[in-house]
Amino acid sequence: MRAMILAAGRGKRMGTLTDHVPKPLLRIGEHYLIEHIIASLVQAHIREIIINVAYRGNQIKEALGNGERYGVSIIYSEEKECLETGGGIFQALPLLGHQPFLVISSDIITDYPLERLHRMPSKLAHLVLVDNPPYHARGDFGLLGSHVDVQATPIFTFGNIGMYRPELFACHQPGYFQLADVLLPAIHNGQITGEHYRGTWYNIGTQKDLEEMNTAYVVAS
C-alpha cells in the first residue's frame, strides 16, 4: 500500500514561523513534524510514500531526500502553486497507483493505528473522524452506522487521515479543488465509510499548538 503525506501548504496560522521554513519542517522535539508521520507509516509497514510539495518545497526535498535513511521510498509530487487537498491528490494519482491509498496530513500528531487501514475501504473512501477541537467546534460529518453522513449526529471533525480509491477522483478535472468537492457527492450516494477515533489526535495548526506539543514532548521524555 502507498501513502501520501500532504505537505504543500504554507501554514499561515503559524505566523512568522513559516516565513522561511515550510510548516512540515517545524520541529516537535528533535524531529520535524513530517518525520513523526513518516515514523507512523513505517510502524504500519507502509514504505512507499508520496509527498506533495509547493511552498518551499525544495527545503522539504533537501531535508528528507529519497527516504532511504528512514527505510522508505519517497517520491515528490511538485505543485507550482498549492492545489489544495483535492487537487493535490488528483495530481499525485499517477504516482499513487491503481490500488486504494492512504492520505495523511503532515501537521497532526496521533497514535491512530494506521495499519488498521490496510483492509479498507469497502466503498470509495474511509475517513477517520475525531472529537471536535475548540477551533472547529461545529465539526464536519456524522456517522450513520459505518457510513459518513452530513446530517447524522453527533458531528465529528475529519482527522485528516483517510483511505481512498482512485475512482473517487475519476470524474473530476485537474487543478485547484477541495477534497470536499469529491467527498460530498460520494457521501450523499452512501459511498464513504468512517469511524470515530477516540485516541490521541492533535492538529498542530498554530504557534501555540507547537509550543504546547513541545512542552508535552519534553515532559513525556
Image (tube, grey):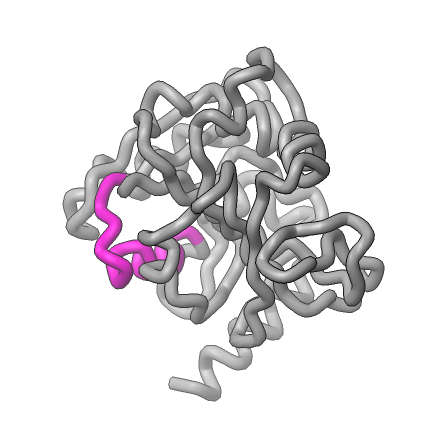
Residue 18: image location, x then y, percent? 59, 44
* Residue beneath the point at 40% across and 29% down: 58
Quadrant into which the N terminus falls: top left
Taken as a whole, is the magenta stretch helix, strand or loop?
Answer: helix
Does 207 appear above or below 192? below
* Residue beneath the point at 35% across and 42% down: 3
Does 109 appear above or below 212? above
**Residue 92 in view, yes or no:** yes
Residue 87: image location, x then y, percent? 57, 23
Residue 168: image location, x then y, percent? 52, 28
Q: Is residue 47 magenta?
A: yes
Q: Is residue 64 left or right of residue 219?
A: left
Quarter-wise, where is residue 77 in the image?
top left
Residue 101: image location, x then y, percent? 37, 39
Quarter-wise, where is residue 42 in the image?
bottom left
Q: Is residue 213 magenta?
A: no
Q: Is residue 218 left or right of residue 189?
A: left
Quarter-wise, where is residue 171 in the image?
top right
| Residues rendered magenta in the picture | 34-48
Q: Is residue 69 left or right of residue 106?
A: left
* Residue beneath the point at 67% across and 47% down: 16
Does 28 appear above or below 81? below
Q: How many labels sit on residues?
A: 0
In depth, the one of 134 and 123 nearer the eye is: 123
**Residue 210 in view, yes or no:** no
